[in-house]
Image (cartoon, coloured by chain):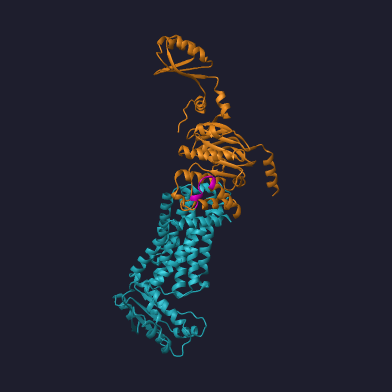
Amino acid sequence: MRFLELAKRNLKETYRDPLALGFLLGFPLVFMLLFGVMLSGDTISSSPIGVIDDDNTLVSQAFVDEALAGVPTLEVSSYDDAALARKDLQFGDLKAYIVIPQGFGEQVSQNWQGKEANITLQMTYDESDIMISEQLVSIINAVTRSFAHIEVPVTINANPIHMEAEITYINFIAPGIIIFGLLILIPTSARMIVLDKEKGFLSRLLTTPTRPWEFLLGYSLCLVAIAIAQIIIFMAVAWILGMNVVGSLWLAFLIFFLAGLCSIGIGMVVASLSKSENQSESLCWIFAMPLAMLSGCWFSIEMMPSYLRNVAYAFPYAHTIDASRAVLIRGVGMGAISHELLFLAGWTAGIFIIGVFLFRKSMRS
Amino acid sequence: MNSDTAQSARGKDEPFAIQTSQLTKKFNGLVAVDNIGLNIKKGELFALLGPNGAGKTTTINMLCCLLKPTGGTATIMGYDINQQPFEIKEKIGVSPQETFLSEHLNAREHLNLMGRIHNINAAELRSRSQELLKTMGLAERAKDQVRKFSGGMKRRLNIMMALIHDPEIVFLDEPTLGLDPQARRAIWEYIVQLKGKKTILLTTHYMDEADFLADRIGIMDDGKIAALGTSSELKMSILGEKTMIVYARNLTQKAISEMRSKYAEVEVNDGTMTITDKQLDFKEIVDQLHSSGAIIRSAYIKEPTLDDVFLHMTMKELRE
């Protein structure tokens, strides 16, 4: 198994070099901590929102009085009329208002009894304040879902819901930051190969009967180990900073893992195209930074013009962020993100095929 | 499987391990290797001798399937470099000119990596690397990462990596480049032990190295093979011209012009007279100079060296 021997060598070369190891694990860690601390400290101090309860059932009242009012960052006021709430929103007295439509109580009750029913809420919010509105949408979403998914209660009042209090901005931002960390695997992976190329060790190995795919697998296995370590560190840091995981950790891990694999593949393609470390480093960052921005690592891409959004969705990372957010903070299952997973897997497979093709070409000039 | 068997059978019958035919490599129009044809016998130690930039390394890189020829081809043990690179890579061991090593691996790990890549089993690998480390004097440093190694140690490991899998053909590209005389001698002694057991293609720009080690030498210049033969054949080829050196005092103008009238080339420089011609009579020259009043301190006929051969063939001095 030549590729195993190569992977072992690559790993030794990495973990015996404190500088390289520091860069691989330390840099993303510092980055994550910095972002996390910067953004997780407080949620919005307190956002006034209005509620118009058109349903007016016990369930909808419980939703307003228990679930929404239980979130410390929300200041809930009831309105009888949507027009009044709209006026307050325009004057800046409200950040958003929610209309609970008729039938809401019925829908939630059905969910409680195990029957699936769509729950609709109408939310109107101040678009100009992007950060706040993103948070509010995310918070209301989370509150509603946890409210609707709750086990059938004996009495509603006996089951006050407290978990929403922990919903902070880190929940929204963490998946993006983790994906940014995994985007950094592009230069990492390119660097590993280009250094061997530049220092000549690769050309020495090219005089052995090792096949192109064995080389790439050897590098990939080592990089996969690095990616797994990075994902664990990221998720741990996000957890420490207060990320509240609603969905399956394993599913989130799978999404991040595929994103990492994709970055490794892109790095390999870049390495095959470049002759020196300088060249590959510049190429990687030129590619990775705009992609991080486009994909919504730091802010939502909802406000981008549609053509830019289309560009973003041509690459796998925006899909990854959407999928991981859905799993981590909304608790969706594999079925709901199968489209994203397929896209990601397809991209990864494609980029590896291109990588092998280019590597084979660069083996002999 | 069948074609493999046929190939190796053909390989066995062939007397040549390496054959090149009109092998050419151009880089952006610049001809690095120009139409060379070489036949290297199995078990032969063949040296490509030439200055830097002559095309030696480019030739080796084409033969190890690292570079694609622009024209012509070559076969290694019957396999074509253009068609069957992986079959060739199974049979060769390469020690590149630069000591390309993995800085954070130790010497034994380097040998293990190369051995396992060539599917050598663990027990055999252990005994072979033990033996190589001992012979090359690196046994005590086997567990040290190579970034702590001296240039000479790296070069020895470089050669060991080419030999660990016991290849049939070994390419040694400038194996003693930049080493002190003692370390060079140690490597030479090891290479001499391999003579006859393996086919070795060695490149060097040290003429004493080629002279000492090689069965046959190809003098390479400007991408071409300028001369080819054993060391003595090459020296004989320029024996048509002899050179006599005379150290003397009292060399009169008359004596010098007498010499010039008799011999093709006579140079006098600070009491040293250098006489070159197809025929030189040692006794006659000494007698004649003596009778013209010169006091001869020493005189000898110079044996040609590979340096002279190189100078003669290429009109260039062979310098480092």
The one of A89 and B202 positioned closer to us in this rendering: B202
- Chain A colour is cyan
A105 is higher (above) or lower (below) than B67: below
Is A343 inside the magenta-drawn segment?
no
- Please state the horizontal and vertical placement of residue A355, each as a whole percent of the image: 52, 54
* Residue occupying the point 50% across, 61% down: A224
- Please state the horizontal and vertical placement of residue A157, each as a whole percent of the image: 41, 89
Q: Quadrant of the N terminus of chain A?
A: bottom right
Is B141 inside the magenta-drawn segment?
yes
Q: Quadrant of residue B270?
A: top left
Q: How many marks?
A: 0
Q: Is residue B196 visible?
A: yes
B7 is higher (above) or lower (below) than A243: above
- Please state the horizontal and vertical placement of residue B62, each as a whole percent of the image: 55, 40
* Residue occupying the point 35% across, 65% down: A34
Q: State the extent of the magenta-drawn residues as a range.
A: B134-142
A354 is higher (above) or lower (below) than B255: below
- Please state the horizontal and vertical placement of residue B184, each as a whole percent of the image: 49, 38
User: Is residue A23 left or right of B25 when viewed as pictured?
Assistant: left
Q: Quadrant of residue A166?
A: bottom left
Q: Is residue B120 visible?
A: no
Give me the chain that's orange.
B
Residue positioned most to the bottom: A155
B245 is higher (above) or lower (below) than A102: above
The one of B195 and B73 positioned closer to us in this rendering: B195
User: Is residue B282 left or right of B199 when viewed as pictured?
Assistant: left
* Residue occupying the point 49% across, 54% down: A268
